[in-house]
Image (tube, helix red, strand yellow):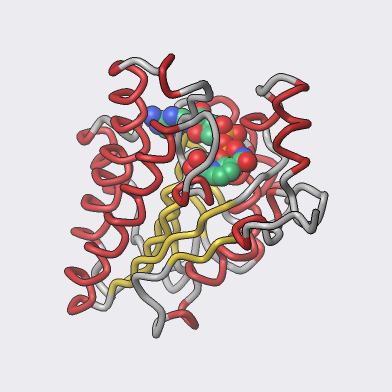
Amino acid sequence: MSSDQEAVLVTGAARGIGRATAERLAADGFHVVLADLNGDDARAAAAAITASGRSARGATLDIRDRSAVAALLDSMPRIDAVVNNAAIFWDGPFEAASVKDLTEMFEVNVVGMFIVAQEAARRMQRGGRIVNISSRAYLGGASHAAYTASKAAVVGLTRGMAVDLAPRGITVNAVAPGLVETPMFRSLSAERQRDILRLQLSGTIGAPADLAHAIAFFASRGAHYCTGQVLVVDGGKSLGSNGQ
Ligand SMILES: NC(=O)c1ccc[n+]([C@@H]2O[C@H](COP(=O)([O-])OP(=O)(O)OC[C@H]3O[C@@H](n4cnc5c(N)ncnc54)[C@H](O)[C@@H]3O)[C@@H](O)[C@H]2O)c1
């Protein structure tokens, strides 16, 4: 990467929305570090980006591990933006969820995000942009109360961080995806996938690139006047009607 090229860290970038976002940000001119528990796939995704003439590097990272997060950020010559995308999902009726399910979800979706954002903000020398990935599910939804709680916490974290980091020129925004065609969605049963699709206003499902487009806006310098916001990208599902 050249010294005046901006650098971005994307977590959970081995696949799905994170990978599409890394590809988009590299095309937008960033040097992109793709971090994931699955380091092999993150490195393969980074290699595909560099093969197309862009600048990227893949790394193994558990976002719950503060010293590993700090070491990765210290290995970057600069940090201008972060996309806090890594998360886990638990699907099932409320009464079947255990405290362990809830705790694990908060450990990754909230505590891990908190650690990455904090360590990155401490290293942002010239201001910066932090984009946290929530979910349309933060508004509520069937069969994932623990996930909903974690994604609502992401919105709270985003708004609180936005206030505290504004004096340092760091913006913090959230993108809340609706249904997106990724391994997370494909891991659901066919019946559950059908039920979810029936509730889509558009009758279609978003592509990872649709989310990358919204995330790239908040990660761009041009979005500097926007902070503490939540952009729901869900094909209209949050309007509350499927036209029937
Ligand atoms: N797919 C959807 O329909 C959908 C809808 C709403 C919100 N979201 C949100 O969008 C984001 C991306 O979703 P996706 O569908 O692309 O997910 P995905 O499951 O396809 O990918 C998530 C990635 O995060 C990584 N990861 C998990 N735990 C990690 C950890 N502790 N440290 C580092 N990496 C870790 C996984 O290895 C995986 O590569 C998530 O925050 C998710 O909650 C997705």
Between 225 and 153, the one nearer to me in the picture: 153
Q: Position of residue 2 (x, y in %)?
A: 48, 66
Residue at x-position 45% and y-position 68%? 6
- Give the answer, above or below, for where 155 lies relative to 98: below
- Give the answer, above or below, for where 168 lies relative to 211: below
Residue at x-position 31% and y-position 41%? 110
Q: Position of residue 179 (x, y in %)?
A: 66, 45
Residue 193, quarter of the rendered image:
top right
Q: How many marks?
A: 0
Q: Farthest residue toward the front?
A: 244
Between 167 and 103, the one nearer to me in the picture: 103
In the drawing, does residue 95 fall left or right of residue 119?
Answer: right
In the drawing, does residue 100 fall left or right of residue 22?
Answer: left
Residue 165 seen in this snapshot: yes
Residue at x-position 49% and y-position 22%? 93
Residue at x-position 56% and y-position 25%? 40
- Give the answer, above or below, for where 101 lies relative to 163: above
Q: Position of residue 169 (x, y in %)?
A: 26, 78
Residue 150, quarter of the rendered image:
top left
Q: Position of residue 5 (x, y in %)?
A: 48, 69
